[in-house]
Image (cartoon, rainbow, N blue to C red):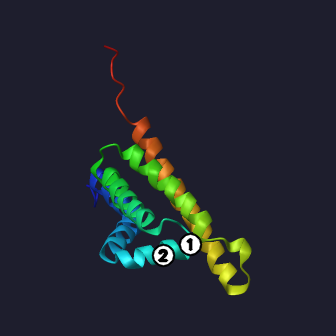
C-alpha cells in the first residue's frame, strides 16, 4: 500500500505549487498598504486596483486549482501571471554582481513554476472524459 494515496499526493503537490501564491495573496490582503507599495515599487499603476487584482488572481486561481473546478483555467492564469511578474520583477539583465546572480536564479525558478502550471492545465484538459455529442 502506498504511503500517500494518489489523490492525496496529487492534491499535496498542487498545494505546494500554489503555496507562494496563497501566501502572497493573503499577505497582500492583510497588508494592503504594503501591497500598494509593492505595485508602486514595480511601476504598476494605478497601484490600488493593481494590488486588488493581484490578490484576487493569486487567491482565486489557487482556489480553482485546489478545488479541481476549472483547474486548467486557474493554472493558465497563474502561468501567465508568473511569466508577466517574472519579466517585471526579475530583470537580471539590468543588474550586475551578486544581485544579477540572485535575480537570474529566481528568474529561471519562476520559469519552472510557470512550466509546472502549464503541465497542470494540460493534464486537467487531457484527463477530462470526452462528452458524447447531444
Q: Vertical placement of 25 versus 56: above or below?
A: below
Q: Secondary structure at mark 1?
A: loop
Q: Is residue 90 left or right of residue 78?
A: right
- The residue at the point 62 percent across, 64 percent down is 87
Calculate the distance from the C-alpha at mark 1 to the C-alpha at mark 2. Answer: 6 Å
Quarter of the C terminus within the rendering: top left
Instruction: Give the quarter of the image for residue 131.
Output: top left
The residue that disc 2 covers is 38
- Residue 3: image location, x then y, percent: 28, 61
Element marked by disc 2 = helix
Q: Which mark is residue 85?
A: none
Residue 56 image position (x, y, % from top left): 35, 59
Residues marked 1 and 2 touching at CB (< 8 Å): yes
Name the residue that disc number 1 marks: 42
Query: Where does the image place residue 84, in percent across and percent down from the top left?
Result: 56, 59
Q: In the picture, residue 23 is in which quadrant?
A: bottom left
Could you tell me which residue is drawn at 32 percent across and 60 percent down? 12
Q: Residues within 10 Å of mark 1 (few under 14, many from 20)?
A: few
Q: Nearer the viewer, residue 48 or 133?
A: 48
- Return the residue nearer the eye: 90 or 49: 49
Furthest residue toward bottom = 98
Figure check: 62 above or below 99: above
Q: Is residue 129 above or below residue 69?
A: above
Amino acid at each position: 500500500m502506498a504511503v500517500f494515496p494518489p489523490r492525496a499526493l496529487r492534491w499535496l503537490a498542487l498545494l505546494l505549487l500554489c503555496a507562494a501564491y496563497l501566501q502572497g495573496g493573503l499577505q497582500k490582503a492583510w497588508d494592503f498598504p504594503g501591497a500598494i507599495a509593492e505595485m508602486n515599487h514595480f511601476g504598476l499603476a494605478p497601484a490600488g486596483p493593481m494590488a486588488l487584482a493581484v490578490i484576487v488572481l493569486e487567491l482565486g486561481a489557487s482556489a480553482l486549482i485546489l478545488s479541481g473546478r476549472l483547474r486548467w483555467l486557474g493554472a493558465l492564469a497563474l502561468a501567465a501571471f508568473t511569466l508577466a511578474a517574472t519579466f517585471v520583477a526579475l530583470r537580471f539583465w539590468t543588474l550586475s554582481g551578486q544581485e544579477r546572480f540572485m535575480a537570474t536564479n529566481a528568474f529561471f525558478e519562476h520559469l519552472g513554476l510557470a512550466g509546472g502550471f502549464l503541465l497542470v492545465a494540460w493534464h486537467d484538459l487531457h484527463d477530462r472524459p470526452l462528452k458524447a455529442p447531444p
